[in-house]
Amino acid sequence: MFHRFMFRRAVILGTGLLGGSFALALKKHRLAAQVVGTSRQESSLRLAQEMKVIDEGTLDVNKAIQGADLVVLAGPVKVILGQIQDISKHLRRGCIVTDVGSTKTAIVEAAEKLFPPHVLFVGSHPMAGSEKSGVAHAREDLFKDSVCVMTPTERTNRMARDKVKHLWTLFGAEVTTMEPAAHDEAMAYASHLPHLTAFALMRAIPEDHLKHGAAGLKDSTRIAGSSAQMWADICSSNYRNVLKALDESAKSLSEIRKAVVDRDEAALMQLFNQAKAKRESLEKKSHV
Amino acid sequence: MFHRFMFRRAVILGTGLLGGSFALALKKHRLAAQVVGTSRQESSLRLAQEMKVIDEGTLDVNKAIQGADLVVLAGPVKVILGQIQDISKHLRRGCIVTDVGSTKTAIVEAAEKLFPPHVLFVGSHPMAGSEKSGVAHAREDLFKDSVCVMTPTERTNRMARDKVKHLWTLFGAEVTTMEPAAHDEAMAYASHLPHLTAFALMRAIPEDHLKHGAAGLKDSTRIAGSSAQMWADICSSNYRNVLKALDESAKSLSEIRKAVVDRDEAALMQLFNQAKAKRESLEKKSHV
């Protein structure tokens, strides 16, 4: 029997946790005749090939994308921005390009500015992954039961949008759609701030006291184990929203500090109950 | 066959998550002939009796403690401090008293000042429980694989200390010993700060953005669902250490903020890698 693949040559630029999981999901659903991966590290490529995450690996991005009809930009945001520039002139007509970047405004703007009209870009942010990174942790079901935010604009090709949406849906994600700017503002609060808070908290605890940490400390700082490079990139590319969120958080912390200084039990109770009520509504509202 | 109980009448003042779990563990190990519980809410007592957490329940603390040879102070810190005052003159000779309070200096000082010499007090802080509260969540194995910090002083009766340590060990906890002041300083960083951070973070996120929260936000704010009363009490009773920890945390956050403002990628990488390395050492050091 003849199986007709949706893509002939799918290329993953950055075969890490997300890129590797995307590649595995493509293979699981037999969506690409050939899955090619790139990495900046030869050892990652070797591992990706051993794990059968990709059929072919290369350090050379421009070689990888030759003849591609699907390109997935799966590195950190800054790398993605550089790659959009590098590959823009070398993609074949009709090639669909998407990404997995955690911030969207800078990426969507660069793609719409630099890709020629015959390259069909649509932005994606799969909210999956964890504090772990690297292809060693890639899984074909990483996107199952997660949310993927897509950020099409009025310039996005409809067929490309539908095909990419179809992929994420097949991979088990619930797809939602947002404007790039609205996405970045929401993520500054719902994702970037919690990560920066966890980094800050971890730094504030003296080494000697770590051994007294129980489950509360562990859970609340799990994400402080995330990739420093990835988070530096997110801060740079979303810095206005991140600053706004950081300031809101500093204000919230200083309101609690004031109530502690004043030993104002009623104020503390009110502040904590506000937080508790919001946490309870999070449990109901969140997709995942 | 005749079973000789370690205690004839064990009394739990405050039959909530911790007190109720202590009662269940006493029963599981057949350590007390009778387990009596108090609560400020009649509905909790009724539930505790229905769940067979206690044999007898009363709203009247002074009635409860009559004839007790073990009393466990299991309410919030402020309630414990009031009860030490209230019950000090009414405990029978040789009665062992311990507590489950999250801060120890104020409680140990009050107990050593107010209890007569024939009452044998030793402080305990079982680091178990969760954001859930109330006897409905009580479990006989709540303390299994947890850490219990005991805070005996030079005035602590050795037999009482050994018996209480024996209880926690039977309940499955690893018992460690600290000075009350050292305990409170360590906990300000390893436990109180993460909780206050989670409360502050939750308050800082606009309601509209909550639905975009993924696993990172959920894990890092789980403890923001904790009891407001319990945490107001902890802040009051440990306020000097809590302030020191809050200031350290604000400093850490503002260092990150500065690097974001400066768009200083090298600084961000350094700050995040510091946090990441500490988080990795937490995974190795922590008892639980």
Image (tube, coloured by chain):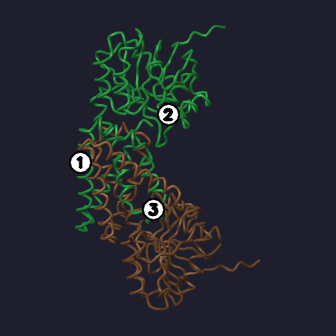
Chain colours: A brown, B green
Q: How many marks?
A: 3
Residue A84 versus residue B176: which sits nearer the camera?
A: B176
Q: Are marks 3 and 2 on the same chain?
A: yes
* Disc 1 element: helix
Q: Circle 3: is it few (<14), some (14-19), or many (20+) Cα within 10 Å?
A: many
Q: Position of residue B95 (x, y in %)?
A: 42, 13
Mark 2 or mark 1, earlier in chain? 2
Q: Amino acid at mark 2?
A: Gln
Give the chain of mark 1.
Answer: B
Choose mark 2 or mark 1, whichever is in front. Answer: 2
Q: Are marks 2 and 1 on the same chain?
A: yes
Q: Amino acid at mark 1?
A: Asp
Q: Nearer the viewer, residue B280 or B49?
A: B49
Q: CA distance from mark 3 to mark 2?
A: 34 Å
Q: Quadrant of residue B262?
A: bottom left
Are the two marked residues, 3 and 2, in contact with CB atoms closer than 8 angstroms?
Answer: no
Q: Who comes first in sequence, dot 3 or dot 2? A: 2
Rendered residue at 39%/40% (across/down): B229
Does residue A212 appear to the left or right of A259 in the view shown? Answer: right
Tell me if mark 2 has few (under 14), some (14-19) or many (20+) residues whose alpha carbon lies within 10 angstroms of its own: few
Picture coordinates of residue A65, whole percent (x, y): 49, 81
Which numbered disc covers residue B247? Answer: 1
- Which element is circle 3 on? helix
* Residue B188, x across and y down, in percent: 30, 39
Displayed quadrant of residue B108: top left
Residue B41: mark in rendering: 2
Residue type (three-letter) at the residue carrying disc 3: Leu
Any mark on residue B210, and which?
Answer: 3
Residue at point 53%, 21% (across, down): B36
